Amino acid sequence: MTRRLLAAATAAAVTSAVRRRLADTTPGGAERWTRTNHRGEPVSMLEGPAVAAGLVAGAVVGAPSARAAAALALATGAGAAFGVVDDLAEDRTATRKGLRGHLGALARGEVTTGGLKVLGIGAGALLAAAVATPRHRPGGASRSAVGWAADVAVSGALVAASANLVNLLDLRPGRALKAVGIAAGPLALGGPAAAPAAAMLGAVAAAAPADLAESDMLGDGGANALGAALGTALVIGAPRPVRIAALAGAVALTVASERVSFTQVIERTPVLRDIDGWGRRPAVT
């Protein structure tokens, strides 16, 4: 319990401190980090780097082992770094959208910031999975190279898919933060992923007020970092069948997002609509 509380407190404190620091000394100027939200109002993406910093700090403090801490830092850092590159350098006049659009561009030899993000987060996810997956079983028996590689592939895919899925949810104030909080809550109750999950809850709690007030947003940098951290926590704390099921769910939702609007589904589903609206300003009428 002490480790979980320390991880949550560290993540919350670092998230808040970094956000204040970035407000005072904004890299490239505040305008570079400002976007227009769904209401047509300006909103800052500085929340993203602040949340990523809080997640990494909480992971280092609360991770159950040095291996787990390194994996969490690698996955979260890659999600944040390549997400911020896409946030700041994306060609917003281009028509390529979604995972399919960026992968299609890569297949044609065209490297977009979104495509670079896919490659970078994917590489970071695989590296984090390799670090998090021991070559020996708990009893000390060595694992076969094929078995270890298969486990790393599944876990790496889960981290990358989770990063992408949380980013897909970051379309309305608080939505991605709530989704991560709901997913991390059960993980924080116990097991190897409890402290990393608690760190996520701490970062979410620190970022939520400004996000719900629509002055801040996660952007790709924050959403990808949160999703990568969540996926890595599952890699650390969940058995293979659970990881495979989580990967299948994340992939299915990602494929569905190419044809179905998550926002429309949420608005048509009373329970989801109520959760989505908690703490938010009334919708534009």
Image (cartoon, rainbow, N blue to C red):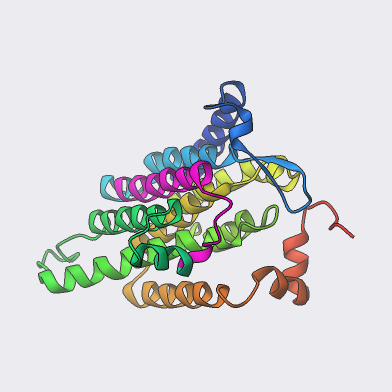
Residue 227 appears in the rendering: yes
Residue 191 appears in the rendering: no
Direction right: furthest residue: 285
Q: Seen in the image, is 258 located left or right of residue 263?
A: left
From the viewer's side, name the closer residue of 245 and 188.
245
Residue 93: percent from left, percent from top: 58, 52
Residue 172, image quadrant: bottom right
- The answer to whether residue 86 is magenta is yes
Main secondary structure along the magenta-highlighted residues: helix
Residue 188: percent from left, percent from top: 50, 56
Relative vertical location of residue 253 with respect to residue 80 in this rendering, above or below: below
Residue 262: percent from left, percent from top: 65, 70
From the viewer's side, name the closer residue of 181 and 108.
108
Q: Seen in the image, is 108 located left or right of residue 274?
A: left
Q: Seen in the image, is 279 located left or right of residue 95?
A: right
> Which residue shows up at 47% across the image and 72% down it?
250
Residue 257: percent from left, percent from top: 57, 73
Q: Which residues are magenta?
A: 70-99
